[in-house]
């Protein structure tokens, strides 16, 4: 004769499993930063660059732990509003942005530099939800980029790899913020189509998109720009806003923030906002790419020259 389980026992077992799963999810925020450290290590590995010292690796690790931890706490607090919003027709995307912004400022000020210098601020579009919203494009060299662009003081949507969805805290807050995930390998036609649909929807609702058109991070190589940002800008006839991100070569290797204890100084990251470029449906995509590429790299020193200067100061 089959024994029937007590509903209370079933519920208790389910709660126990959920608790264990949630604990593992939170605990992974102490493990998953390790691959992020390895990725950053590889970015700085080319002989043209100063390789990361032991202290730099520690900084990158803790940077990621705090990034995941703060977004995890903020995301968990926002989940109830997200769920209720699905029923009553609102979301938690603005609050998710506030968590992202807070996290970026904390991580940057604790491990990278005291502040981020903004140049060309007069070229920054007004934060007035005008339609179509602009498309931001920037060079991509390091995970530092993901923090410093929040110093622009503008809300936007990211394009993120689908695998990021599963990172503790980070994936949760990006999901709550309704950012766009894309599958970069294999059969990804549906994913690419969703990228354009979601990007166009955001642009037409007055919410800018932010692209790193190089597609991946490189310090020692200037990769060509991909089409995605330009297709979105042309379809919506948006302004393209080129942004240069200059990361000092001493960024991770400096003793910041410990050097503040003995009055040391640290070179700030610099964001340069260039004049907007108006995109039209019938524009030459390659010409748009060239214009933004030239603008972005016009103020960034050639990596060889920068490395030479850096080594002279060591």
Image (cartoon, rainbow, N blue to C red):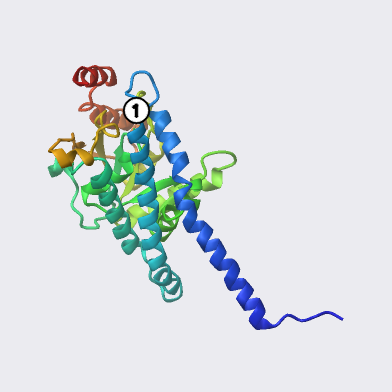
Q: Quadrant of the C terminus?
A: top left
Q: Quadrant of residue 98?
A: bottom left
Residue 206 in the image: state x and y as whole percent: 29, 56
In depth, the one of 121 and 26 nearer the eye is 26
Q: Position of residue 70 (x, y in %)?
A: 35, 57
From the viewer's perspective, is 311 left or right of 200? left
- Residue 10, picture quadrant: bottom right
> As drawn, is 83 to the left or to the right of 55?
right
Residue at left 38%, top 55%?
A: 69
**Count of numbered marks:** 1
Asked if one can make out residue 140 in the rendered structure from this viewpoint, the answer is no
Q: Residue at x 37, y 29 (%)?
A: 218
Label 1: how many Cα within 10 Å (few below 14, some 14–19, many 20+) = many
Residue 67, given in percent of the width and then of the height, sits at 36, 50
Which residue occupies the foreground of this view, 297 or 31?
Answer: 31
Q: Is residue 254 visible?
A: yes
Quarter that holds the N terminus: bottom right
Residue 176, relative to residue 153: is it above or below? Answer: below
- Does residue 85 sit above or below 122 in this rendering? below
- The correct choice, above or below, for 233 with respect to 248 in the image is below
In this view, the residue farthest toward the front is 262
Which structural element holds mark 1?
loop
Q: Which residue is mark 1?
A: 219
Q: Position of residue 270 (x, y in %)?
A: 20, 36
Q: Residue at x 36, y 32 (%)?
A: 54
Q: Pick out the residue farthest to the right.
A: 1
């Amino acid at each position: 004769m089959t024994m029937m389980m007590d509903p209370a026992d079933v519920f208790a077992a389910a709660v126990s499993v959920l608790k264990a799963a949630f604990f593992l999810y939170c605990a992974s925020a102490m493990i998953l930063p390790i691959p992020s450290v390895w990725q950053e290590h590889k970015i700085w590995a080319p002989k043209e660059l100063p390789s990361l010292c032991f202290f730099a690796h520690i900084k990158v690790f803790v940077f990621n732990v705090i990034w995941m931890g703060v977004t995890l706490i903020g995301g968990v607090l926002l989940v109830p509003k997200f769920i209720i919003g699905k029923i009553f027709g609102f979301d938690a995307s603005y609050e998710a942005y506030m968590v992202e912004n807070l996290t970026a400022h904390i991580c940057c000020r604790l491990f990278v530099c005291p502040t981020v210098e903004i140049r060309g601020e007069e070229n920054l579009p007004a934060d007035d939800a005008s339609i179509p919203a602009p498309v931001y494009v920037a060079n991509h060299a390091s995970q530092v980029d993901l923090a410093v662009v929040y110093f622009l003081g503008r809300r936007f949507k990211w394009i993120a790899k689908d695998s990021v969805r599963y990172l503790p805290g980070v994936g949760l807050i990006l999901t709550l913020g309704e950012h766009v995930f894309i599958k970069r390998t294999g059969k990804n036609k549906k994913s690419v189509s969703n990228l354009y649909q979601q990007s166009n929807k955001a642009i037409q609702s007055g919410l800018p998109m932010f692209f790193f058109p190089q597609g991946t991070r490189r310090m020692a190589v200037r990769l060509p720009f991909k089409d995605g940002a330009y297709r979105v800008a042309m379809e919506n006839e948006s302004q393209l806003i080129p942004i240069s991100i200059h990361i000092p070569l001493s960024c991770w290797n400096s003793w910041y923030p410990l050097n503040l204890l003995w009055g040391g100084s640290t070179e700030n990251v610099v964001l340069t906002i260039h004049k907007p470029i108006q995109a039209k449906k019938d524009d030459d995509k390659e010409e748009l790419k060239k214009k933004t590429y030239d603008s972005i790299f016009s103020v960034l020193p050639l990596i060889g020259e920068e490395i030479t200067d850096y080594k002279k100061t060591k």
